[in-house]
Image: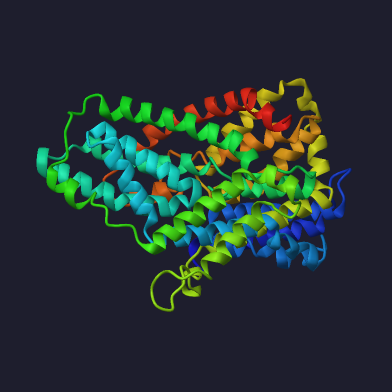
Amino acid sequence: MNKKQKIIIPLLVLITVMFFIFQPPEGMSIKAWRTSNLTIILAVLWMTETIPITITALLPIVLIPLFQIGGIKQATAPYANELVFLFMGGFFIAAAIEKVNLHRRFAIMIINRIGYSKKRIILSFMFVTAFLSMWISNTASVLIMLPMALSILSELSEEAGTDERYEVALLLSVAYSANVGGIATLIGTPPNAFTAAFLREHYSIEISFMNWMIVGLTFSIAAFIALYLIIKFLFLNKSEKSKLIEHQKSSLFKINPISKAETKVFILFVFVAVGWISQPFLSKIYEGINDTTIAMLGAIILFIIPSGKANEKILEWSDAQKISWGILILFGGGLSLASVIQTSGLAVWLGNLFIPLKLFPPYFIVFIISITIILLTELTSNLATTATFIPIVASIATGMNENILLFVIPATVAASCAFMLPVGTPPNAIIFSSNKIKISDMIKTGIYMNFASIIIIMTIIYLVLPFLINP
């Protein structure tokens, strides 16, 4: 064991022993008491990453039966939640887009269209990264755009000398656009789908792909504008105008003729995206149509249609082995924890604790929750933060007799607003690894973005969220 494991694992064992020795507080059942123990164990392991967070997500399968909180079926059923398969289908479609290089074609087309001045390059990179992050993982989006960004910076350095302020501006704009773009759709980042699954499972509240976009896309657009203005204010006002030389345009941004495989993936992607957006209407025509069936149908088709090469399909199983299976396990582990928090009575007990908060305006409580989640997600996985705290946030809403969505949706959005530290999100870490950004630059820009995110979240829940609560 490493040093962290030698400290934290014995501490958690000691805490568990104490939970089994001492009786629960008045009004709390034994199951709720032991669920509190399970929540502490998972929260500490997720936040400290003492063991891999995906492995931590498997602990409910073992500990829920051992702690006698519930049976093995209750522990394992959430791992097969329908929104886990929605995410799986999204991963397969993203894998096909990456395999045929459709994402790069889109990126080059947008950059060529917007232009080559320094400010326009940043704007085009932001737009492409944010759009890609709506449909594929934010990590993949940044890995796609980073080499292109570094090539541009190298070319500009040869032309006019190194401009460190512009380097920081371009790289941060790529990282933060990936974070912002993922919030727009239900599959853009795991916390969104987790919350949708949690609400459906425990409160019978259905949030479709289109429903989420009412809030998510609104936030993404507003945050995108705020990000560009912040980047421009901090880094670009004093930056000299410059054009890329013709060689760069002809090499880096050259578009090859579109292949048959790209055409097929593009058609299927449009089919799936339109299906998701129109699902509320389609489900009225035929009840069996939902976001998950649309995603899985698209994914299955990718394994059937030929790519244009001999005996090769668009996706082979070797491609499927590369998708983020760990995220799906983490997703299931969070839902399993959320399930026992609800069924054990812990959610009701926690909700009762927050009854006195009725004295405060609900928007003030949402404001405090959003700030807390943003600070926590700077240090931990956004899905781990969501899995741990969304059931608690829902309990607060219940205790205050407020609409669940009023509290849960802002908390979910806030979980993806990690801008200050490299550990906050994979895009932050990837960009920081380029060795062209100082932590001080990330913190300075991140503070502005966090502040802007809070303002946007509060504005959206006041102006936009009512359309989701009362469609």
Q: Is residue 450 above or below residue 274?
A: above
Q: How many marks?
A: 0
Does residue 165 appear left or right of residue 370 in this picture?
A: left
Q: Is residue 431 above or below residue 65?
A: above
- Residue 213 in which image quadrant: top right
**Which residue is at the front of the view, 320 or 168?**
320
Q: Is residue 40 above or below residue 296?
A: above
Q: Is residue 407 above or below residue 54?
A: above
Does residue 29 appear left or right of residue 46 in this picture?
A: right
**Which residue is at the front of the view, 396 or 93?**
93
Does residue 94 appear left or right of residue 28 in this picture?
A: left
Does residue 5 appear left or right of residue 429 in this picture?
A: right
Residue with the most extreme bottom position: 311
The answer to whether residue 438 is visible is no
The quarter of the image holding the C terminus is: top right
The answer to whether residue 224 is visible is yes
- Residue 224 in which image quadrant: top left
Q: Residue at x 29, y 42 (%)?
A: 111
Q: Residue at x 50, y 50 (%)?
A: 135
Name the spot of residue 173 as percent of width and height, x first.
35, 38
Q: Residue at x 25, y 24 (%)?
A: 237
Which colouring convention does the figure follow? rainbow
Name the spot of residue 142 as percent of width and height, x first.
38, 50
Name the spot of residue 227 as percent of width and height, x first.
40, 31
Name the spot of residue 255 as percent of width and height, x first.
27, 53
- Residue 75 in which image quadrant: bottom right
